[in-house]
Amino acid sequence: MHERVLAGEARTWALEALSAGGVAAVRHPLGFVCLPLERDGGEGVCVHLWSGSLAHAESTTSQIHCHSWDLVSHVLYGQVRNVHAVVTDAGADATHRVFEVVSGADGDRISPTGRTVRHATGLVEVFGAGQTYTLAADRFHSSVVPEGGEAATIALGRGRPGGRDLSLGPLDGAAHHVARQPLDARESELAVRLIIAHLT
């Protein structure tokens, strides 16, 4: 799958995979709907959908996060801004705490770490339909879609040994668990239809 995306066949592959049916979509706390399509060991492929037609989950920390895996993201349609965050360790003047996110079958266990930080907006990259970008593990960022915009991407993740999924949250935030929010069959079908309609 990575080879097909890099060869420019992402659109065709997405249409084939989604048209096959049986996709169980979930609401992701980073504001999109995730449609998992393929998992092979430490690699995974999902379609991420931002749409006002579907309710989305709210983050309990913030949109600023970093992955334990290297990312290749291909924009199927719409516009996505990859906003890099410059994160600096801080003491008394800290504005956020770093939280570790450990995902399991029943959801995410989110735990505060001892690291407190400040952050500023760094490089802002803007990508449109047909464009592909990469992001190395351990880079804090957020993915932003213009308000009211519709967008979808194929996200390909390749795990990096020893990496951790992290998110910036409130200084006084406590450990907590966030359950998965699956879409029902009707919503999952709607998500698939929305994507296919934009690609055909």
Image (spheres, rainbow, N blue to C red):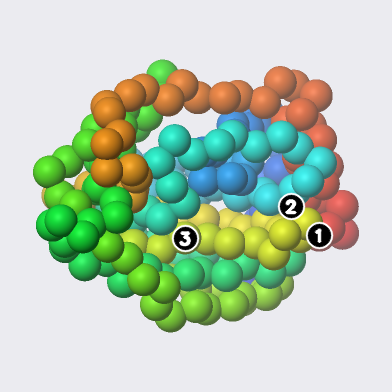
The picture places residue 48, in percent across and down from the top left corner, at 60, 49
Q: Are marks 1 and 2 in contact (CB under 8 Å)?
A: yes
Q: Which residue is mark 3?
A: 142
* Distance in Å between CA atoms under marks 1 and 3: 25 Å
Q: Quadrant of residue 154?
A: bottom right
Mark 3 burial class by Cα count in 10 Å: few <14, some 14-19, many 20+: some
* Residue at disc 1, secondary structure: helix
* Distance in Å between CA atoms under marks 1 and 2: 7 Å
Depth check, front residue: 61 or 192: 61
Q: Amino acid at mark 2?
A: Leu
Depth check, front residue: 140 or 6: 140
In the rendered image of this protein, does residue 198 appear above or below residue 120? above
* Residue at disc 3, secondary structure: strand
Residue 109, visible in the rendered structure: yes
**Residue in view at x 75 percent, y 37 percent:** 54
Q: Which residue is mark 2?
A: 15
Q: Which label's residue is closer to the chain start, 1 or 2?
A: 2
* Residue at disc 2, secondary structure: helix
Depth check, front residue: 93 or 48: 93
Mark 1 burial class by Cα count in 10 Å: few <14, some 14-19, many 20+: few
The count of marks equals: 3
Left or right: 1, with 182 as reference point: left
Q: Which label's residue is closer to the chain start, 1 or 3?
A: 3
Q: Amino acid at mark 1?
A: Leu
The picture places residue 28, in percent across and down from the top left corner, at 54, 38
The picture places residue 117, in percent across and down from the top left corner, at 22, 58
Q: Which residue is mark 1?
A: 199
* Distance in Å between CA atoms under marks 3 and 2: 26 Å
In the rendered image of this protein, does residue 167 appear above or below residue 72? above
The picture places residue 178, in percent across and down from the top left corner, at 42, 25
